[in-house]
Amino acid sequence: MSKKPSPTNSRKSPVAGIEFVSEAAGVEEYLLKSNGLRILFHERRDTDVVTTNITYFVGARDEERGETGLAHMLEHMLFKPTANDLKNKIEDGSAMRFERETGCILNANTWKDRTTYFFCSPTEHLDRMLALEADRMQNVVLTDETLKPEQGNVLSEFDMYGGRPDFTLAVQMVNSAFHSHPYGHETIGFREDIEDYNAEKLQRFYKNYYRPDNAVMMVVGDVDKKLALELIKKHFAELKNPATPIPRFSIREPKQEGMRRVTVERPSTTNLVSIGFKHEGFPSHDWFVNDLMLDTLTSGPESILHKLLVDTGKASSVASSMDPSSHSSLGVIEISLAQGQSHSEIEHLTLRAIESLTLKEITPLLKKAKIRNITDELFARTSSMHIAQELTEYVSAGDWNVYAKTTEILNKVSPKMVLDSLKKSFNSHNLTIGHFVGTK
């Protein structure tokens, strides 16, 4: 859960009823006093484009057993008509009509800690974009009749992912890695739970989490600050929070005391070895060290494991991933085996190579990884949409101010930090190993 803000100085807000909280890297935080809605504003002049991005602090980690994937399902439903749409005979929903009429970019996505909705369009449409977000915060009409077709779409989405060997293995790995914490299921949920959704479950979830005091409204782009804040106040100030507190789980994952293993067998020509390790939450210093660590291991033809496995014909590809999640999550190295290779031999070869790495080997790779990551970071900050998307991860993890320090943190990562992280991360008591075995 993101921390509640408190004003840090006496700077005045240009709009009554909205309180200034803090500023970092040109991003200003405000608080709508009537209901606790948080606001992030970042001006990007001379583009004629603005992005609105609302982040709700609800995701897969807020789902109970038997109701996995509810956050993702609700995300789909927020593009359905609101009560106001039906009153005005807009049966396809105002958001979708807005897209067709203006050609704007709009989308949404759900992850472990949050659900996010965004619009990107010429600045002239800002008023309408904010009106749409305020309306669907609490007014979407949820019935079994409107749910059924979208439920079918999500089941089809699940089956599409479920047909992929990497997704199938990932589902089993996180389920084995986390015995108690809700990070132990994928965001889309389990198929059996999706089949059992009904409007009553969705309505309860909607009421619990879609509320002003559980959201951050971002406006990034070519717009005057006073105007942006006035429009946010206009559309959101009258929205009320439920009298009930926001439900939160307080779950600590039991200590892992040995390597965990999963094997999936399925008719396929694909064979995979995945090496999963638990890492610190985002945006901690250790998270950035681990991110660079994975870069040295798997990014590009000069990386350690590419040379070891792909260049020698033992694997067709090597990749890695790590989530920007607020709690400890599972980072993964995924190796796609070449024909005829043994899962156990590739696993052993990989772990032995990681264990034997030295500062001399890491140093030149880390230097390039830092340059590459910092370049990507700075390039992303030239686009209002990319800025909003990146801020979303910092906001949902609990400390958006670290956004202002990212390049500084990356610059200070040393080869010894990476080497120490390798030893800690790939300790056998921290690992979950997965094999996808393609059978004939």
Image (spheres, grey):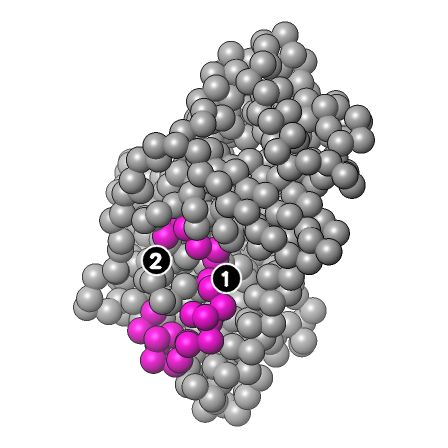
**Residue 17: % across, % down:** 29, 57
**Residue 52: % across, % down:** 52, 58
Within 10 Å of disc 1 (Cα), the crowding (few <14, some 14-19, many 20+) is many
Is 260 located above or below residue 354 in the figure? below
**Residue 196: % across, % down:** 42, 76
**Residue 261: % across, % down:** 48, 41
What is the chief secondary structure element of the magenta stretch? helix
Query: Is residue 21 covered in magenta?
Result: no
Q: Look at the image and tell me whether residue 44 can be seen.
A: no
Q: Is residue 411 left or right of residue 244?
A: right
Amino acid type of the residue that numbered disc 1 sits on in the rendered structure: Ile
Q: Earlier in the sequence, mark 1 or mark 2?
A: 2
Q: Split into 4 quadrants, where in the image is the C terminus?
A: bottom right
Q: Residue furthest top?
A: 360
Is 110 located above or below residue 12 in the figure? below
**In the rendered image, which residue does mark 1 sit on?**
188
